[in-house]
Amino acid sequence: MGILSTVFPVVHCDSDSSLAASAIKSVRTAVSVPETELRRWRRIFDVNSKIINGERYLDPDSFVNAIAPTGDLSKIGKAQFAILFKIADSSKRGLVSWEDFIVFETLLKRPDADYWMAFQFFDVDNSGYIDFDEFKNVMSANIGSDAIPFDFDCDWVKLYLGKKNGAHVLGYNEFTQLMKGLQGERLRQAFKYLDKDQDGFIRPDEFKRIILEIAGHKLSDAVIDRLPTLCTLSPGQRISYSEVIAFHNVIREMDMVERIIREATASSKDGRINQSDFLDYASSSSRYSLFTPMEASIIFHFAGRGNGDQRLALLDFAQLLDPRWVAPHDAVEAKKPTATSTLHAIAHSAYSFIQGGFAGAVGATIVYPIDMGEMQNQRSTVVGQVLYKNSIDCARKILVNEGFFGFYRGLGPQLIVPPEKAIKLTVNDLIRSRAMDPETGRIKLGWELVAGGTAGGCQVIFTNPLEIVKIRLQVQGEAAKAEGAVPRGAMHIIRQLGLVGLYKGASACLLRDIPFSAIYFPAYGHLKSDVFKEGYNGKQLSFMETLAAAGIAGMPAAYFTTPADVVKTRLQVEARKGQTHYKGLRDAFVKIYHEEGFRALFKGGPARVLRSSPQFGFTLLAYEQLKKLFPYPWDDKPRRVETALTSRPDEISKIRARNALKILLDVHGDFGRRAAASGNKLSLISPKLYSKD
């Protein structure tokens, strides 16, 4: 607390000392700014500063370039950031030094930076107080003569600044309260000024004029164009004071509106919400109800383009939440010709298949030594055939008898032929993309199961031949050593089996792979979205989070499908003398159960979990990384709602600079623009506009 109080001191603004001078002095002596932050500030300063008289300084233009966010998601003009130059230029020489710049950046870190900057802007004489004349002159100079008039002699202003000759002056704390209520008073006066008949209603165009002055910079052009339609919420084609206040409350609390909408749509089953869902979530996330039914109706009216009764997705709210929102181009939304779309789909699938092939090879190679085909094949009913006590004993004997490379026996066919994981990943992605809601990005659980199951079924066409060759290569190592035979290669096994023989045990393979993928892919998707919160406020999963999601999803999928894998292994391995022969899938299940018991169906289950879980973890991790590093060149980027809540961390100092303008822009949306538009400059001593004369 001592360090924080040094950087952000508690200043009693009604004392005799100068508020600005004491604050800047305390900040200059602070030593709590992290070194990494200082380096970042130094880099920004050096890139934008100019050498003047042998020293580096920021002039007004280069200062704006240094602090204004790149590609800002608001409608704040770059020229408006020049307002902050007066605060940064503490020596009033028209230049900002490196020392001034770090003081300014540190001040931006104050939790009340917006009020602090506004106070310093209105405090023209740097006295630490604001009197009636300062308040009136600064505000009048920046809202312009063409704005809706504001009565400075009203009772509301007198309550703050006194009734007689501006007898009362405001310290910092009192000033913050005045500024918090100022926009509401301007709204009240503007409505009263335009309501000539004093009947409590104004015309739609008059309502639009009020909102443009007070909060036009917070709204997208699409919402501004639809402002007059607010009159359709109630009969009479006019807008009441209650509706104006309700709309203003929505805009004033837009950050909270966005937070509630993001969280409510994320927790909704279909990714959509209606007005009741919005109000329920708003009331459950706070002690008191934040929004009235009228305010919820206004939110859904503009988000639903006039139809507020429908269930809306996050993207539907984009034009209300994002001031820079523009309607998607017609060319993007227009359907492409069928031939082009078909070729595009084929090319996209082929591209995904290649990426899935590489990813599958990575995963298979990493975990291949854990694939205990020999453990699952041993027959406990034949004397002398119980070669391995457990998975650890199996691994030990393979290492002793066959060496390290014995663990990789049979890997070649997995890598030479296109890996099965490529088929599984491609088919799953293809079906999910067709079944997915384009606005919410959600897919129903039934379709998730269909996509995963179909992907598992399709891979059997390629995996069954690979599996049977791989297993026979694996099990022949120990048998060849026991019988003194010479191990044969993959081509010998393929010639021996023939085309039909390569698909021996395919029914068991289907019984294993369809439920495996039907369990795995939905579990993986929900772990990413529901547990690790992928996509929430623009979050991207880290390396470890992706690996964890993929690995955890593989555990239940691998273990619960072990019986089918055991049966498949028994059917595909050539039975030796004294071993039970199986006629088919059902016969194998029955004989294994009667001869060896229920536990035999789960032989190698832990090893299968240890293999499949990390294998799919590394496979999916490699696949996700490949898609990020080498995205499909002609793929349409998904539409996202980009706002301040999704800003990158490295832009945080520039976001603070924008937020520091909030209170001044609440005075008037064009605050600071008039000087730039007219060619006049803001005085570095006084914020009043210079005259061209």
Image: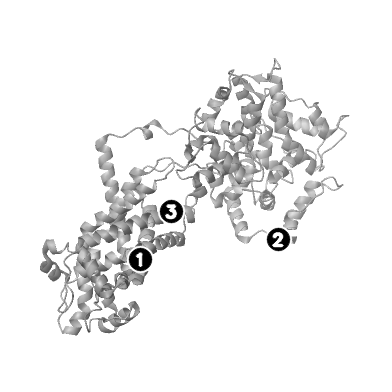
CA distance for labels 1 and 2: 57 Å
Residue placed farthest to the top in the image?
197
Give amino acid for label 3.
His
CA distance for labels 1 and 3: 19 Å
Of label 2 and label 3, which has the lower sequence position? 2
Identify residue for label 1: 559
In the rendered image, residue 635, in percent from the top left (x then y), is placed at 35, 44
Identify residue for label 2: 31
Identify which residue, 360 or 218, lies in the foreground.
Answer: 360
Residue under the image location 82 percent in, 48 percent down: 12
Q: Marks 1 and 3: CB-CB under 8 Å?
A: no
686 on left or right of 538: right
Of label 1 and label 2, which has the lower sequence position? 2
Disc 1 secondary structure class? helix
Q: Marks 2 and 3: CB-CB under 8 Å?
A: no
Q: Is residue 170 visible?
A: yes
